[in-house]
C-alpha cells in the first residue's frame, strides 16, 4: 500500500467521525431550542450531510484506487493520486470553513459556495487520469467489478456536472426546471457511487471466496446492466412531485419495479450464503459486508414502497425520506466501506481487538434499526396528521412527532458510540505503521483467512 493510499483511508475515516459528530449535534440542535442558539441546526445540517457524502466518496475512491493496482497488475502514477487527494481534501477543508463562517450558496446536499465545485471537479479529473492510466492495461475481458468501478467514476463526473448546471442562468429561469435537474442529478449520483462501492464489495467477495466466477458470466452482467439502468433512469421517483411528462414517471416506475428482480435474487443469494457464512464468519470484513446485505433488504423494501406514486405523494419530504437516505448511506454504503477498509488495512492480521469490534458492529446495527424505525414512524405520523387529519398548524402537527424524534436522537448517540469506536480503531491502525507490501496488493486471502 502506498503512503498516499494510507492518507486517503485516514482522511475518509476522519470524515466519518466528523459526520457522526455533526449528525448527533444536529439532532439535538433540532430538538432543543436552547442548544440550537449556540450551534444552529441550519449550519450543522449541511456540515453533517457534506461530511457524510465526503466520507462515502472518499472511502469509495480509496478502495477503487487501491484494488485497481492488484487487478490491473500495475501501479499508475502516484503523483496523480497525491494531486487528487491534496486538492480534494483542501477543498473539503474550505467547505467546512465556509460553513463555519455561515457562507452557503450551493444547492441541496452540496450547500457550499458554488465556486468550490471547480477545484473539486479538477480533483476528480486527476483521479480519472490516475485510474484510466491503469485501466488501459486491463485484460481483454475484465471482471464485472472493473466495469462497475469505471462506470461509477465516469458517471460521477457526469452527475457532478449536471448537479452544477443550475449555475447556468437558463437552468435558473424557472424554479421547476432547476429543482427537476437537482433532484434528478442527486438521485443518479447515488447510483454512481453505488457502482464504485458495490464493485469493491464484489472484488473483496471474489478474494474471500477465491471464486472469480461470481464476477463473470452473463447473469452477473445482466444484474450490472439492471443496476446501470437504475442509475440512469430510476431518479424518476425523485421527481414524482414535479409536473414532468407522464411517460418519464411511468418509465421510472417500471425500472424501479424491475428492481424487484434484483431483490428476489438477493434473497436467493442470501440463502446460498448460509454455508459461506459458516466458513467466513470469523472475518471482520465479511461480517460488515453481510451487515450491508441486511440493510439492502430493508432499504430496498422501503424504497420500492416509496416509488409507488400513490405512496410517494404522502412520504415525499417527510422523515421517511430521511430514513431512506440514512438507512442507505449508513446501513449499506458505510457498512461496505468499513468492511473494505478492514480488508485494505488487513485488520484481522494486525489487530487483536476483534471481540470489541464485533460488539461495536452489533451495537451499531441495533442502534441503526431503532434510529431507522423511529424516522419511519415520525414520517408516517407527520404525513397522516397533515393529509388525513388536515392539521395545518406546524407546531400542532409536530407535537407527537417530536417525541418520536427523541428516540431517533438517542439511537443516533448509539450509532455515534458504535461507529465511532470502529472509526477511531481503524484510524489508529491506519496511522500506526506502514503496511509492507511491495505490489500494493492486499495479502492473498488464503494466508489470512484459512484459520
Ligand atoms: C455515517 C453516518 C451517517 C451518514 C452517512 C448520514 C447521512 C445523512 C444524510 C445523507 C442525510 C440527508 C438526508 C436527507 O436530506 O434526506 C442526513 C441527515 C441527517 N442526519 Fe445523518 N448520517 C449519519 C449519521 C447520523 C447520526 C449518528 C445522527 C444522529 C442523530 C444523524 C442525524 C441526522 C440529522 C438530524 C439529519 C437531518 C434530518 C432532517 O433534515 O430532517 N446522522 N444524514
Image (cartoon, grey):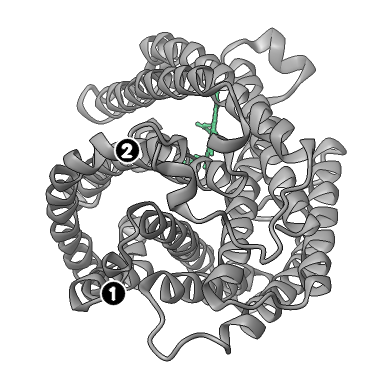
Which numbered circle lies on residue 425? none
The number of discs equals 2
Binning the other alpha carbons within 10 Å of mark 2 as few (below 14), some (14 to 19) or many (20 upward) gives: many
Q: Residue at x 43, y 51 (%)?
A: 446
Quick one: quadrant of the C terminus?
Answer: top left
Q: Residue 381, relative to residue 4: is it above or below?
A: above
Q: Residue 74, relative to residue 29: is it above or below?
A: below
Instruction: Let me know if residue 419 appears in the view.
Output: yes
Please name the residue that numbered disc 1 is placed on: 216
Q: Is residue 121 left or right of residue 308?
A: right
Please name the residue that numbered disc 2 is placed on: 295
Mark 1 touches mark 2? (CB < 8 Å): no
Residue 169 appears at what percent x and percent y? 67, 76
Residue 433 appears at what percent x and percent y? 79, 40
Q: Is residue 279 left or right of residue 441?
A: left
Q: Nearer the viewer, residue 44 or 224?
A: 224
- Residue 207, located in which quarter of the rendered image? bottom left
Could you give the CA–CA distance between mark 1 and mark 2, rounded to whole angstroms?
25 Å
Residue 210 appears at what percent x and percent y? 35, 59
Q: Residue 372, relative to residue 55: is it above or below?
A: above
The mark that comes first in sequence, 1 or 2, is: 1
Amino acid at each position: 500500500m502506498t503512503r498516499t493510499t494510507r492518507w486517503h483511508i485516514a482522511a475518509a475515516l476522519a470524515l466519518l467521525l466528523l459526520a457522526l459528530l455533526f449528525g448527533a449535534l444536529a439532532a439535538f440542535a433540532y430538538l432543543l431550542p436552547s442548544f440550537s442558539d449556540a450551534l444552529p441546526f441550519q449550519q450543522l445540517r449541511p456540515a453533517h450531510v457534506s461530511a457524510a457524502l465526503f466520507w462515502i466518496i472518499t472511502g469509495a475512491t480509496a478502495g477503487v484506487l487501491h484494488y485497481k493496482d492488484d487487478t490491473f497488475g500495475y501501479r499508475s502514477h502516484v503523483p496523480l493520486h497525491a494531486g487528487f487527494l491534496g486538492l480534494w481534501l483542501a477543498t473539503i477543508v474550505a467547505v467546512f470553513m465556509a460553513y463555519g463562517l455561515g457562507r452557503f450558496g450551493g444547492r441541496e446536499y452540496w450547500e457550499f459556495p458554488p465556486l468550490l465545485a471547480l477545484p473539486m471537479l479538477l480533483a476528480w479529473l486527476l483521479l480519472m487520469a490516475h485510474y484510466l492510466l491503469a485501466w488501459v492495461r486491463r485484460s481483454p475481458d475484465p471482471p464485472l467489478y472493473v466495469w462497475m468501478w469505471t462506470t461509477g467514476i465516469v458517471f460521477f463526473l457526469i452527475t457532478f456536472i449536471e448537479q452544477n448546471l443550475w449555475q447556468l442562468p437558463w437552468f435558473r429561469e424557472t424554479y421547476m426546471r432547476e429543482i427537476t435537474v437537482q433532484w434528478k442529478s442527486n438521485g443518479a449520483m447515488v447510483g454512481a457511487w453505488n457502482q464504485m462501492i458495490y464493485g469493491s464489495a464484489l472484488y473483496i467477495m471474489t478474494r474471500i471466496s477465491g471464486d472469480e466466477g461470481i464476477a463473470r458470466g452473463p447473469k452477473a452482467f445482466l444484474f450490472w446492466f439492471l443496476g446501470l439502468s437504475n442509475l440512469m433512469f430510476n431518479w424518476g421517483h425523485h421527481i414524482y412531485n414535479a409536473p414532468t411528462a407522464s411517460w418519464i414517471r411511468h418509465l421510472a416506475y417500471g425500472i424501479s419495479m424491475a428492481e424487484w428482480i434484483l431483490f428476489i435474487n438477493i434473497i436467493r443469494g442470501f440463502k446460498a450464503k448460509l454455508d459461506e457464512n459458516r466458513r467466513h464468519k470469523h472475518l471482520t470484513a465479511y461480517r460488515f459486508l453481510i451487515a450491508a446485505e441486511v440493510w439492502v433488504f430493508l432499504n430496498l423494501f422501503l424504497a420500492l414502497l416509496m416509488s409507488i406514486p400513490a405512496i410517494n405523494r404522502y412520504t415525499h419530504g417527510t422523515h421517511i425520506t430521511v430514513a431512506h437516505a440514512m438507512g442507505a448511506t449508513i446501513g449499506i454504503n458505510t457498512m461496505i466501506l468499513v468492511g473494505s477498509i478492514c480488508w485494505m488495512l488487513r485488520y484481522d492480521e494486525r489487530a487483536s481487538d476483534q471481540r470489541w469490534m464485533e460488539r461495536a458492529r452489533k451495537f451499531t446495527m441495533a442502534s441503526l434499526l431503532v434510529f431507522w424505525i423511529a424516522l419511519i414512524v415520525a414520517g408516517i405520523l407527520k404525513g397522516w396528521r397533515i393529509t388525513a387529519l388536515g392539521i395545518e398548524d406546524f407546531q400542532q402537527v409536530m407535537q407527537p412527532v417530536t417525541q418520536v424524534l427523541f428516540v431517533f436522537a438517542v439511537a443516533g448517540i448509539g450509532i455515534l458510540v458504535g461507529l465511532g469506536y470502529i472509526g477511531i480503531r481503524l484510524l489508529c491502525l491506519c496511522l500506526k505503521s506502514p503496511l509492507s507490501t511491495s505490489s500494493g496488493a492486499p495479502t492473498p486471502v488464503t494466508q489470512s483467512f484459512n484459520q
